[in-house]
Amino acid sequence: MSDPMEFLLWVKGPMFEWALAIFAIGLGARIVEIFMLGRKPNYAEPRGSELGPGFRTLLSRTVADPGTFARAPFDVVVGLVWHVGFLIALLLFIPHIELINSVLGLAWPGLPNPVVDAVAAVTLVSLIAVLIHRIAHPVKKHISTFEDYLIWVATLLPLLTGYLAYHRLINPYPMALGLHIFAVEIFLILLPFTKLTHIFTAFIARWYTGATFGRKGVVS
């Protein structure tokens, strides 16, 4: 597949459909697996409700508590920067919104392209800083696995290829756009089978933790 336009048509056609199918089936299976695990019956008399505390914990755990920030300020600040930046680049870039609208029929206002471009640049720098910190930190380097580096690459490449394509830094342009779409498809394929699943399961886990403590009458 040496022709750039042929490659672009392939990633926008069959490859895109395969990636979406693998993503949807894989993620669905993971979520079903989580709920099928169930939990042991709790016969103790409830001392509080589950619903409210569950949602409270879901929201409160989104922001790091002062103790966590004091112990690991780099992880909190840089982690927040690149997570928010990734979401802005993904969900508020107008061409992305148009793609989502064409697939799901959903649309919302986006940000001006120069704003998203600046956010993407900051996010790329933040991700590189995360990698350097992981390698330089003795404990993090020791506990890091191949999967940790794989998902770092899978997260970086959609941003990097998108940035290069937007600035026309790869020629011809169909190849640049095709590489960006292909990087996103690899991200989607890997997501259900790696730690990237936390994008969805973290919310389930946080709600469950809050609900469990709420039933006991304890603040999570």
Image (spheres, helix red, strand yellow):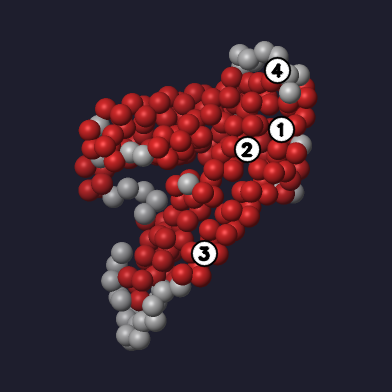
Rendered image quadrant of residue 16: top right
Whole-percent x and y of residue 32?
Answer: 55, 64
**Kind of residue indicated by mark 4:** Tyr
Residue with the mark numbered 1: 11
Depth check, front residue: 51 or 9: 9
Which of labels 2 and 4 is toward the front? 2
Which residue lies at the image location 21% right of the left edge and 42% below the top edge?
Answer: 71
CA–CA distance in space, label 3 to label 2:
24 Å
Mark 4, secondary structure of its residue: helix
Q: Earlier in the sequence, mark 3 or mark 1?
A: 1
Which residue lies at the image location 35% right of the left edge and 86% below the top edge?
Answer: 43
Q: Is residue 6 above or below residue 80?
A: above
Q: Give yes or no for contact between labels 2 and 1 (Cβ–Cβ under 8 Å).
A: yes
Whole-percent x and y of residue 171?
Answer: 67, 13
CA–CA distance in space, label 4 to label 3:
42 Å
Residue with the mark numbered 2: 185
Whole-percent x and y of residue 217?
Answer: 30, 75
Depth check, front residue: 145 or 8: 145
- Report if residue 108 is visible in the image: no
CA–CA distance in space, label 2 to label 4:
18 Å
Mark 1, secondary structure of its residue: helix
Which residue lies at the image location 40% right of the left edge and 37% below the top edge?
Answer: 146
Residue with the mark numbered 3: 33
Mark 3, secondary structure of its residue: helix
Q: Earlier in the sequence, mark 2 or mark 4?
A: 4
Q: Earlier in the sequence, mark 4 or mark 1?
A: 1
